[in-house]
Amino acid sequence: MQITFSTATLPKSGAVIIPLFEDGKKSKAFTDINTATDGGLERAIKAAEYKAKKGSILEIVAPAGLDNGRAILIGAGASKDFSALDAESLGGSAIGKILSTREKTAIFALSGFTTKKLDAADLAAHVAHGARMKTYRFDKYRTKEEKTDKSALTKIAVHSATTKAKTVYATLDKIGDGIFLTRDLVSEPANVLYPESFAKRCNELVKLGVKIKVLNEPEMKKLGMGALLGVGQGSVRDSKIVAMEWLGGKKGEAPVAFVGKGVTFDTGGISLKPGLGMGDMKWDMGGAGAVTGAMAAIAGRKAKANVIGVIGLVENMPDGNAQRPGDVVKSMSGQTIEVLNTDAEGRLVLADALWWTQETYKPAAVIDLATLTGAIIVALANEFGGMFTKDDKLAKQLGDAAETSGDLLWRMPLTKNHDDMIKSDIADMQNIGGKGAGSSTAAAFLGRFIKKDVPWAHLDIAGMAWNEKDKPTIPKGGSGFGVRLLDEYVRANFEG
């Protein structure tokens, strides 16, 4: 998608998009276009009793006085509350409407569209970013798609009163690249994206300056990663650990580490999942996808910070060699685990990945992301990722990053009682608790693999990695959740 910024005269072809605040405040662009249509915009507003509520759209096809194919009024809500995320939602909502037409060009008429919270450059850049996010499609396997089923849109032009928007957008564009990468990874079918091919996809980050390190099964076996290897032993696909290193900060300064669960397909193993909906388990690598996309965004914008991304890649399959319920495995940390349910496999993968990350990189903080439990969806639906941490400072940092990025989190309980629920009669711990608090007991399990005094948070994103319905900036499918969150966390806390 071509995205341009200009202060010149609006193009006469394509669809022109004019935002409008519900308090009646009119922009210069609105006034100019209304004049060109001999009051056509105001007449349409009156006839439709249009109130410019946030995200509401009023479409005028072939407006008199304009050569443009259509004019689209989009509501921006109250001007005093309008934020960067609102600007993105506005851009995405408007483009969502254009995508259902045969228009090839969309023009945002933003001249004079101002708000106290954003200067003109930031506003225009965020509108453009939201618009781009909505254009994402994963259609590489469609071979007989009707022409009318595919959008004709190829260009988005943003017209405002400043030339600085392009510079602001350049950074957002790199973050957008990371989000699109994560969406691609999460959307790929499991016969295409498996541990080895996922590792190869990570090599694409080398061109951004990221150093890639891959551990294979013999190396992991030598390191004693019995927990991770136990999950993958039922698959013909070899398991991997991939480390992505971006050293853009001060030499020798401890990095922040992101660790992602990368179960490229999860049948549940011997504890087999029901067949209905099992195909969704191609995105059980959503945590690894988010970490990979975040590393692409961070490296793409040349962040002045040292950041490590580690992903544990396995496929959880049932066969004659698969891990059984009741097996006991020994993790890299030396702790033993009684595996009572082979479908509680992500925590086994993360146990070894977290320990190896701490041993190898001595990080200043560790954050893991995983599509870990269905219980978090019961608690938070598809509205928030669950945040588990005993570190109040880290919780505040992540909470602030969530509010700024729009990747929302809700802090969940993590106590000694939850840790007591995973005590085993024959091993150091068992991999599941009782019937209740499934997300908290999973977090407590992971906490046993965090070294003393290492700031750590676990983010359960099971309800957020995949989008079941369209949102203003997120089409149905892979959401890219976590990329902006991690990028913002790095920007706010590890860059001067």
Image (spheres, rainbow, N blue to C red):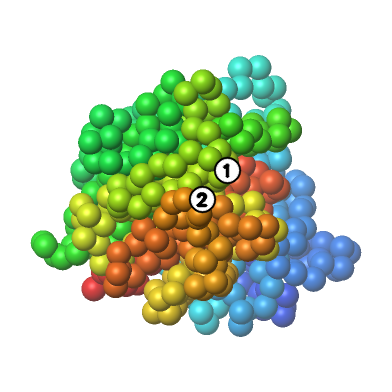
In this rendering, does residue 192 appear at all?
Answer: no
Give me the residue at 87% from left, 63% from top.
48
| Residue 445 in the image: above or below residue 393 | above
Q: Return the x and y of residue 261 as percentages of the image width and height.
A: 44, 46
Report the amino acid beneath label 2: Asn
Give me the residue at 30% from left, 52% from top.
333
Where does label 2 land, which residue? 431
Q: Return the x and y of residue 152 as percentages of the image width and height.
A: 61, 34
Mark number for residue 341? 1
Quadrant position of residue 229: top left
- Mark 2 surroundings: few (<14), some (14-19) or many (≥20) residues within 10 A: many
Secondary element under disc 1, as helix, strand or loop, is loop
Give me the residue at 64% from left, 48% from top.
467
Between the C-alphas of marks 1 and 2, the distance is: 7 Å
Kindly give the residue lying farthest to the front in the view shown: 426
| Residue 137 in the image: above or below residue 160 | above
Cβ–Cβ below 8 Å for labels 1 and 2?
Answer: yes
> Position of 360 compared to 407: left or right?
left
Mark number for residue 247? none
Give me the residue at 42% from left, 63% from top.
447
